[in-house]
Image: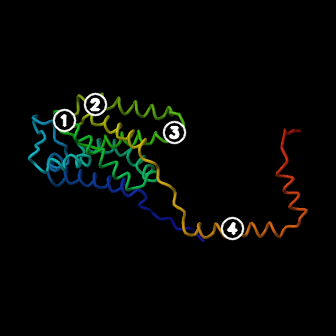
Amino acid sequence: MKKKFRVTYNAPVTLTFAILCVLILLLNDFLLGKHLIPAIFTAPARIGSQGGFNYKNVFDYFRLFLHVLGHSDWNHLLGNFAFILLLGPLMEERYGSKMVLLMFVVTAFVTGVINVCLIPRPLLGASGIVFMLIILASITTLDKNVIPLSFIFVVAIYLGRELINAPKAENISTVAHIAGGLCGSMFGFLVAPKTKKTSKKEKTEAPAKKESNIEENRSKPSFLKKKEQADDDTTVVGTLEI
């Protein structure tokens, strides 16, 4: 009998986030004359600068969160989601979808606030979340006092690209992206991975399996029990290969 393959929505937070970003960019480029993202999905600039944060405008507070859904072009979007679609599902499996959603929201807010406080130009894009995921993914090996060289290369390349492109990019804040990495470090050290839940079937089978092993041991002849005990007490001091 052939097994049927099925497509699963394995990482709801990551996949939903990616779909929303694609839909927003499609609407912005092809239906709304490229006015949607600058109006809604861009974090305000520093207070007092052009396009700066207006504390009297309630909508500017929402833009502190929504800016991660907007991207300047398709290259910007694809560059971010090469990392997000790779690391996001792994982090959802490790920490749970609800916790990863909280991480996304907190990182968006922190990067938005930093942009409002320090940067004299608007901010958009999910690069802060990307850097948060990169740092968060590395914490699993830092527990063993090991830093993989591949991780160092990824961080160096990503930071190098940000620093090189920073003077050319009008709506990208390198400082805010580094803040996303700091958020990843904070989450990695403060948030514990989710524990694996034991299914009801495993809970019911475990006592039955234990009882069957006891009964099997009782039914064995005494000379077999003595032999097994002798084998357990034997200490191996060396091996000889011919």
* Disc 3: which residue: 143
Q: In which quarter of the image is residue 228?
A: bottom right
* Disc 4: which residue: 209
Q: Nearer the viewer, mark 2 or mark 1?
A: 1
Q: Residue at x 27, y 36 (%)?
A: 176
| Amino acid residing under circle 4 | Lys
Q: Quadrant of the C terminus?
A: top right
Q: In which quarter of the image is the N terminus?
A: bottom right
* Disc 1: which residue: 117
| Amino acid residing under circle 2 | Asn
Q: Are marks 4 and 2 in contact (CB under 8 Å)?
A: no
Q: Which residue is drawn at 38% across and 52% down?
A: 99
- Local secondary structure at mark 3: loop
Classify 10 Å Cα crowding around label 4: few (below 14), some (14-19), many (20 and above): few
Question: Image check: 112 left or right of 153?
Answer: left
- Label 3 to label 2, Cα distance in Å? 33 Å
Q: Earlier in the sequence, mark 3 or mark 1?
A: 1
- Local secondary structure at mark 2: helix
- Local secondary structure at mark 4: helix
Question: Image check: 174 left or right of 6?
Answer: left
User: Which numbered disc covers residue 165?
Assistant: 2
- Local secondary structure at mark 1: helix
**Residue 11 horizontal/vertical position (percent):** 41, 56
Question: Image check: 146 left or right of 29?
Answer: right
Q: Which of marks 3 and 2 is nearer the N terminus?
A: 3
Q: Which of marks 4 and 2 is nearer the N terminus?
A: 2
**Residue 172 horizontal/vertical position (percent):** 24, 36
| Amino acid residing under circle 3 | Asp
- Label 4 to label 2, Cα distance in Å? 61 Å
Q: Is residue 161 above or below residue 97?
A: above
